[in-house]
Amino acid sequence: MFTGIISALGTLQEISPCQDGRDTRLAIAAPWPEMESIPLGASIACSGCCLTVVAMGKNWFAVEASGETLSRTTLGAWRPGQQVNLERALRLGDELGGHFVSGHVDGVAEILSAVAEGGSTRWRFRLPRTLARFVAEKGSVAVDGVSLTVNEVEGDEVGGCVFGVNIIAHTARMTNFSRLKPGDHVNIEIDLLARYVARLQEGV
């Protein structure tokens, strides 16, 4: 489990095929001073996607992403130099500053706009139809692993939805929002509570 509070901004260094080319190994540079203390098998959220550490060095770690993960997230389009939001797994006693985030990406959204609004920036995203019903005004959503509050929701012409969040300057500096732009795609994880409420309403 994670909180959606990004603790470091990493950089993708290398991409290489593994498991007969079906999966991909990603080497990511990380600025954590305690890098060498992270055990093999540890979970790290990489732009919202929970991945397992399979190797590490003084200032880097490597993870493997399956074909399933590559097809359902933005990871399949990553290239060396890509900035990656990083968060280590939540430990008992840690401060829960965001909301409970599982690191299981539900889908990919397209960035529509980023417009200055007071001291922050209003970012708007188009969400696929299958996820539209899980997003509500003042609810929580994880965008590339960042815990955010939904400030607006409206339907679109294909049955999906457009939602907006506000990003303050500090969040932009500490995450990949400083490099994102309209037309880019981001990983989305809906709120766990919204997921289970929807399942209960279905009578499943």
Image (cartoon, rainbow, N blue to C red):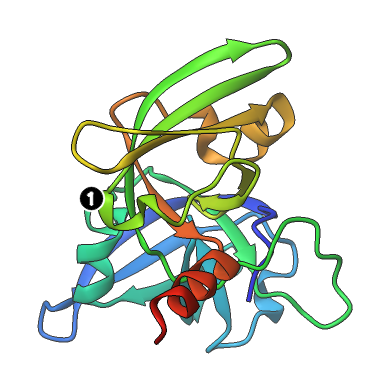
In x, y percent, where is residue 32? 69, 60
Q: Where's residue 42, x and y in %? A: 58, 84
Which residue bears the numbered disc 1?
77
25 relative position to 54: left or right: left
> Residue sitting at 60 percent across and 33 percent down?
151
Query: Would you say residue 103 is visible in this rendering?
Result: no
Q: Is residue 48 above or below residue 66?
A: above
Nearer the observer, 194 or 86? 194
| Residue 92 higher or lower than 72, as above or below | below
**Quarter occupied by residue 14:** bottom left
Query: Alpha-carbon neighbours of circle 1 within 10 Å: few (<14), some, or many (≥20)?
Result: few
Q: Is residue 56 left or right of residue 174?
A: left
Residue 78 vertical position relative to residue 17 in the rendered view, above or below: above
Percent across and percent down for residue 49 are: 45, 65
Per the image, label 1 sits on a secondary structure element best described as: helix
Q: Is residue 136 left or right of residue 188?
A: right
Q: Amino acid at mark 1?
A: Ala
Q: Residue at x 58, y 58 (%)?
A: 86
Tell me the quarter of the image containing the N terminus.
bottom right
Horizontal and vertical percent for residue 200?
Answer: 49, 79
The quarter holding residue 134 reads bottom left
Snapshot quadrant of residue 15? bottom left
Q: Quadrant of the C terminus?
A: bottom left
Q: Residue at x 47, y 19 (%)?
A: 114
* Residue drawn at x 65%, y 69% as measured from the top left: 2
Is residue 130 shown above or below 159? below
* 55 and 134: which is toward the camera: 134
| Number of dots carrying numbers | 1
Can the viewer see residue 184 in this picture?
yes
